[in-house]
Image (cartoon, rainbow, N blue to C red):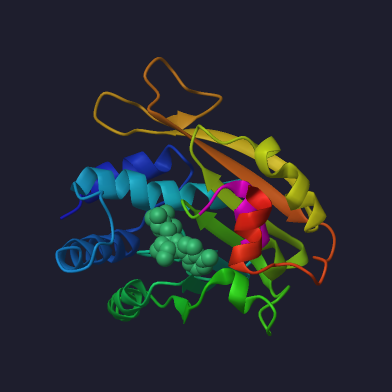
Amino acid sequence: MLPEFNIAKEIFLKYDLKLTEKQYEAFDIYAEFMAEYNEKVNLTAITKPYDILVKHFLDSAIPLTYLEFEDGYSLLDIGTGAGFPGLPMAIMFPKLKLTLMDANGKKITFLKELTEKIRRILPIEVTIIQARAEDFARGDLRASFDIVTARAVAPLAVLSEYALPYVKVGGVFLALKGASESYEQGAEITEELGGDLADFAEYFLPVNENTVGGTAETPGETPGDLRRLFIIEKTNITPKKYPRSNAQIKKAKK
Ligand code: SAM
């Protein structure tokens, strides 16, 4: 279903991602199963094969190219939906220990079936949890992950409160964002939660055949869609009062 292997491989290489045939096969199984499941459960509005490759798989995998990390690092993806960005990250870097979390039971069922299929060809280690992030952060998983990620879940001011309690001191929270959000919009609460902006990256997705994609340093004339990545390091322990309840978080935002 996806564009041919050689096309996919070439696009991924622009971002320093070396796609193997096995990984491509895993992505193809992913795309097929998501399209099939999408007919009964609403998982994604992105349905064209090229768009799935670029806007879901590539966009999800790129952020890890900005990090130095070791085999066996743990990664939690909050509000993962149909698995983004966590699952493509684990397909590209199968030595990560992945945990996917979402509040929605239908998406959790999809992810369990999907990961079983992927694991038949690629030995990824994955745990799947149905929970709201802010309800689950007081248990054993608090301060236990090397990397926490989230894409398209909430504004940074809210997302930091979901994510930072789970990050170990010294670990990172990767917030994947579009062009419209700045770090300043969530800076105060992020720092209160023990986070600090360690790095910031911008890259472009080649969203159609007329765009070339690439990093902010090599945009050319028709780069494509801008994406922003905030790399937030956990420098201090998150105070015990966080995360607050969903109602309190919403109230504080007003
Ligand atoms: N991250 C995926 C992506 O980029 O395609 C899914 C994005 S979807 C717009 C938002 C997802 O976040 C939904 O699946 C929703 O159930 C989940 N979600 C929203 N708030 C959440 C929370 N507090 N805890 C866990 N999951 C949450």
Q: Quadrant of the N terminus?
A: bottom left
- In the figure, residue 55 lies in which quadrant? top left
Percent x, y of residue 92: 44, 60
- In the figure, residue 37 lies in which quadrant? bottom left
Q: Is residue 21 above or below residue 205?
A: below
Q: Is residue 211 left or right of residue 249?
A: left
Residue shown at the point (70%, 79%) measured from the top left = 138
Q: Nearer the viewer, residue 100 or 3?
A: 100
Q: Is residue 160 magenta?
A: yes
Q: Nearer the viewer, residue 96 or 44?
A: 44
Q: Is residue 109 above or below residue 51?
A: below
Q: Nearer the viewer, residue 150 or 73?
A: 150
Percent x, y of residue 150: 53, 57
Main secondary structure of the magenta stretch: helix
- In the figure, residue 96 lies in which quadrant? bottom right
Magenta residues span 154-162
Asked whether residue 196 is in view, the answer is: no
Q: Give the image quadrant in which the ligand numbered 1 is located.
A: bottom left
Residue shown at the point (30%, 66%) measured from the top left = 26
Q: Is residue 210 left or right of residue 251?
A: left
